[in-house]
Image (cartoon, grey):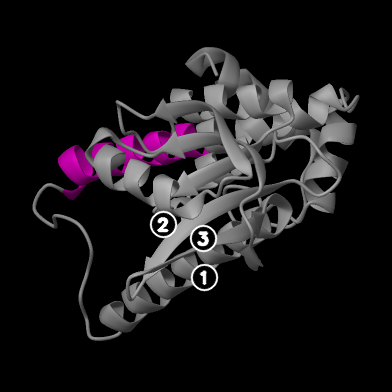
Amino acid sequence: MRSTYSAIGKFVVYIKSTKDKDRGNALVGRALTGRSSIVDSFIETEVRKNYKPELEKAIKKCNERAAKLIIPNIGHLPRSLAFCNSVMKLEGSEPYVCAIRETDGHVAVYKYYTMQMFLQCVDHIDINKEVAKKAIHKKMSTGWKAGNTVNLQSVATKNAQKVRIEQANEYCKEIMPVIREIQRYGKVTLQGIANALMARNIKTRRGKDEWTPMGVSNLLKKAGELGV
């Protein structure tokens, strides 16, 4: 997914939070050479899992100026589906993100190819789901029961329903950037979108490989309700 890279050319800097500002700028100063220049810099001031407006601005600037996106101290961003969906908007035949890392006092720049990063992120999410399922099954085999047995119907059921709705809303917000991108490439029918999602090996919220027009329709309806 990554390889060492000589930082030469035009760059747009993206720093993931204000607390990383000083360290991020220091890493950029050490990583970039005399044959590189900074077009613009963006710092995320409000850190949310699925809301990264400064990242969107940085990507737009990269596409406008034919510059590369460079991120100091990238950390766990490649595990975020929202992040991976955003960087998929970078233009080019093989778009990638430049990440600055410091190890044992040595600063190096690596390429993170956007498609590989996106696919590995999806795999990471699937693996975590399976690990969680196995842990729950193992605990239940000992006789443990989930929920509040005293107020199961009146409280636990309502709480479970609330969680399901929140999870559905969260998934919708994560997957809609991908669907919008598919639509921009001319896939506008429900079946066309479903086929494109399957071609990208993206699973449904319930972990299924097969997408149906009805499933896509439900997602679009929810996206309208959420305003995403």
Q: Are marks 1 and 3 in contact (CB under 8 Å)?
A: yes
Q: Quadrant of residue 122?
A: bottom right
- Please, what secondary structure does the residue beneath circle 2 have? loop
Is residue 2 visible in the rendered image? The answer is no
The residue at 77%/35% (across/down) is 91
The residue at 47%/56% (across/down) is 100
Q: What distance separates the C-alpha of mark 1 from that of mark 3?
A: 5 Å
Q: Is residue 158 magenta?
A: yes
- Disc ID at residue 125: 3
In the rendered view, would you say 218 is above or below 3? above
Q: What distance separates the C-alpha of mark 2 from that of mark 1?
A: 16 Å
Query: Please, what is the dominant secondary structure of the magenta stretch?
Result: helix
Task: Tell me the magenta residue range.
Answer: 152-171
Is residue 130 visible in the rendered image? The answer is yes
The residue at 42%/53% (across/down) is 30
The residue singled out by tag 1 in the image is 127
Q: Quadrant of residue 70?
A: top right
- On the image, the x and y values in percent for residue 135 come to 34, 77
- Please, what secondary structure does the residue beneath circle 3 have? helix
Quarter the N terminus occupies: bottom right
Q: Quadrant of residue 5?
A: bottom right
Whether residue 130 sits left or right of residue 159 in the image: it is: right
Q: Amino acid at mark 1?
A: Ile
Quarter the C terminus occupies: top right
Which of the marked residues, 2 or 1, is nearer the chain's N terminus?
Answer: 2
The residue at 62%/30% (across/down) is 176
Between 154 and 168, the one lying in front of the other is 168
- Please, what secondary structure does the residue beneath circle 1 have? helix
The residue singled out by tag 2 in the image is 76
